[in-house]
Image (cartoon, rainbow, N blue to C red):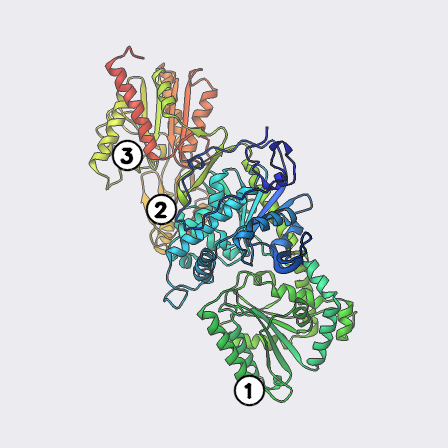
Amino acid sequence: MVSRSYSNLLDLTSGDFPSLGRVGKRLSRVATVASFMTEVDDSDNSNISVGSEPPSSISQDRMIIVGNQLPLRAERRKRRRTEDGEEEEVWDFSWDEDSLLLQLKDGLGEDIDVVYVGCLKEEIDPIEQDEVAQTLLETFKCVPAFIPPELFSRYYHGFCKQHLWPLFHYMLPLSPDLGGRFDRSFWQAYVSVNKIFADKVMEVINPDDDFVWVHDYHLMVLPTFLRKRFNRLKMGFFLHSPFPSSEIYRTLPVRDELLRALLNTDLIGFHTFDYARHFLSCCSRMLGVSYQSKRGHIGLEYYGRNVSIKILPVGIHMGQLQSVLDLPETESRVAELRDQFMDRTVLLGVDDMDIFKGITLKLLAFEQLLIQHPDKRGKVVLVQIANPARGRGKDVQEVQSETYATVKRINQTFGRPKYEPVILIDTPLQFYERIAYYVLAECCLVTAVRDGMNLIPYEYIICRQGNEKLDDALGLDKSVPKKSMLVLSEFIGCSPSLSGAVRVNPWNIDAVAEAMDSALMVGDFEKQMRHEKHYKYVSTHDVAYWANSFMQDLQRTCNEHVGRRCWGIGFGLGFRVIAMDSNFRKLSVEYIVSAYKRTRNRAILIDYDSTMTTTTLPSSASTTSTLSEAREILNSLCADPRNVVFIVSGKDRKTLSKWFSSCEKLGMAAEHGYFLRSNSEEEWETCVAVPDFDWKQIAEPVMQLYTETTDGSAIEMKESTLVWNYQHADPDFGSCQAKELLDHLESVLANESVSVKRGQHIVEVKPQGVNKGLVAERLLATMQKKGMLPDFVLCIGDDRSEEDMFEVISSAAKGSSLSPVAEVFACTVGQKPSKAKYFLEDSTEILKMLEGLAAASEQFARNPCYN
């Protein structure tokens, strides 16, 4: 039977399934919506809270690469029609060899089939769209997304370029002139276009086998649409721009929606650790999702799914550069430039004409160089290649005007006959012409104030390595090692990988001018050493290496999909997928109530601290009605003679005695099991013998030191325990301080009989051997001595401290302390790695379940014969 995922246009058009009866016919495309959408389209209820798709019976290694633009060039050409001899204009398509999306294919291997989804640069008439789509699908395996011009303008020039791009480059819209205020219609257009892209992916995807790789900030909410439709989809995302610090990013009104969408992928890639660190900080501060490093891999746990973080800068396409270096045109152009700049040293800048490339700052620094070093006049030339800006607007015009004015002033001030200090090239250059400038330049200057990656320095390094023909054109001795120099801004993505470059703060004009002078004055041997180091890195970490590394990490991360159960919850852009081990399942209230009714000796252990506090059990400010409701439920359970009920808490015994004074038959364990009593008539006893608490005199001053230096933290002093709580501190700083405090306490308490542990927003010191598992052991042993061999055990908790209880009752089920037919329910709150077999979503569901058990006990009290 053909998998239901095989609405796959590529397989249909290739004729792999003639039985479907559609081969050779023109296939209609998935209908796309031209209007704006404010959220994910929830009209298809089958996409909400659905289980995982059944596995496909057909396997195929394929990568679907999704980017804003397809790696294609298109032009209109006249061709003669064969039937009637008339001429007509038709579209002629070819691969865009400069496209990164095309170049990365080299790193995926020949055994992986690649399909592209994206827009075309050219606008296609609606009448021609079906024909063009069919041609691109059959000829290039490209699926075009046709976006209406007005919608595309709001999506690309509006939200992408007016909101996201400036913000990700650290420019806040403080006034209408600086990017403009947030426009909700732009956001709606952005969501709509991402939905159209999702429809295009669905046309060709086989979700059971295909990988999807989404690129850049244009498509940040696309993962939510795809994950909503295919819960097990293997999907990665790479951000090619910077990711700003949390203080900048948090100003975006739709900040949570974008973060949650990215977390719907399996792997998120960044160029540098700084970008990844900012993203992780945003997830922690805004979503409460923390990360951890395991065996060198950084990951976030998001509703039971592991989202990996990849840190690797993109590389260049070595083959393409080498082929251009070998062109006769390149050799000829290098010879021309050699004659043009005879006896002069060339500094080179290659930048887009936009506000973040720092062209004007570079010109000012060069001007300062000529002022401070008169001997450089007439000998040093700055060639500035200014590519057209990718955006548009007033800021681009201002950059152009300022650049032209600065160049004019410098040339008028320091120029002389046959010498122009600055040569500004603002007309489009052929690639080989740009390569020729790289080959000739003694130093490359990249002083952008903010840039995601910037591959100009990489290209420069490879071109300076050159080849024999270019060496002849320059008159170089082939036996002499090659040399190069780089002056790089600290704020560009490639800077960390080029450690031999002279790094500068582009805003510091004097420092940049001094760096230019230093680059010119460095000796040949040092230039050779720096070049050799850079060339080794750039030549081995090319675009193929980058793509292959990303693919390997994506495969590693997605291996966890096997054997896990998944389903989707939530509406709109709040949709997410819950994943868990196949043996880990939601506890059915009906099932546990049924087991409860047919059993006779029941042990019930309920964690207090976070399991029920949200909606049932009180904090100091909780209402009396909430406390009364909790007491009523617990008293109903305790009133059943077949039950032994214990509340287990980290709170002190005085607090628990006060809150549950009316629950006379309720057992309580305070301070994680150090204090214990079976009911209100008994005295508190200790589970572990502790000779003294002298260690507190050592630990408390240390905790006090960290409390004074960490705003929002506090010390909780209990009889047996000291707790440092940083719940209300800055999450990043609090986490950092907690790690330091943990190390500090472990050091000073090394000779004491205590354990130092870190929990959720706490660092805790307590006597060795004290844990909540002791309560479970004591309860089961006591019941066994009384001849009440438990045949029903319920243990509920929500954090690491309850794992000890889960472990005890799981072990007991295999031993003699429980009835051979005992029903054991270890239940954690929320879906996360746990020793528990069951889970409930939150405290509301815990309350509902306990109410069901209490109702069963009350029914038994009224009619003992019903069970």
As displayed, is residue 375 above or below residue 552? below
Residue 332: numbered disc? none
Chain-order first, disc 1 or disc 3: 1
User: Label 3: which residue?
Assistant: 616
Q: Quadrant of the N terminus?
A: top right
In this orientation, which residue lies closer to the viewer: 576 or 400?
400
Q: Which of 487 and 385 is in front in this view?
A: 385
Residue 858 occupies quadrant = top left
Specify the quadrant that holds the C terminus.
top left
Q: Which of marks 3 and 2 is in front?
A: 3
Mark nearer the N terminus (3 vs 2) = 3
Asked if residue 296 lies left or right of residue 588, the reply is right
Measure the alpha-carbon separation of dots 1 and 3: 79 Å
Up the image or down, 117 lies above or below 96; here it is: above
Judging depth in this view, the residue of 693 and 277 nearest the camera is 277
Q: Against 577, is 88 above or below?
A: below
Q: Return the disc, 1 or 2, that comes first in the chain's sequence.
A: 1
Residue at mark 3 to residue at mark 2: CA–CA distance: 23 Å
Pick whichever, 771 or 496, lies toward us.
496
Q: Can residue 740 be seen in this view?
A: no
Give the alpha-carbon distance from disc 1 to disc 2, as whole Å. Answer: 66 Å
Q: Residue furthest front?
A: 84
Name the residue carrying label 1.
412
Disc 2 element: strand
Question: Farthest residue in the top direction?
Answer: 865
Task: Identify the amino acid type marked 2.
Answer: Asn
Q: The disc labelled 1 sits on which kind of residue?
A: Gln
- Give the image location of residue 194, x and y in percent: 47, 50
Marks 3 and 2 in Cβ contact (< 8 Å): no
Residue assigned mark 2: 725
Instruction: Give the amino acid type for the residue marked by disc 3 in the picture.
Output: Thr
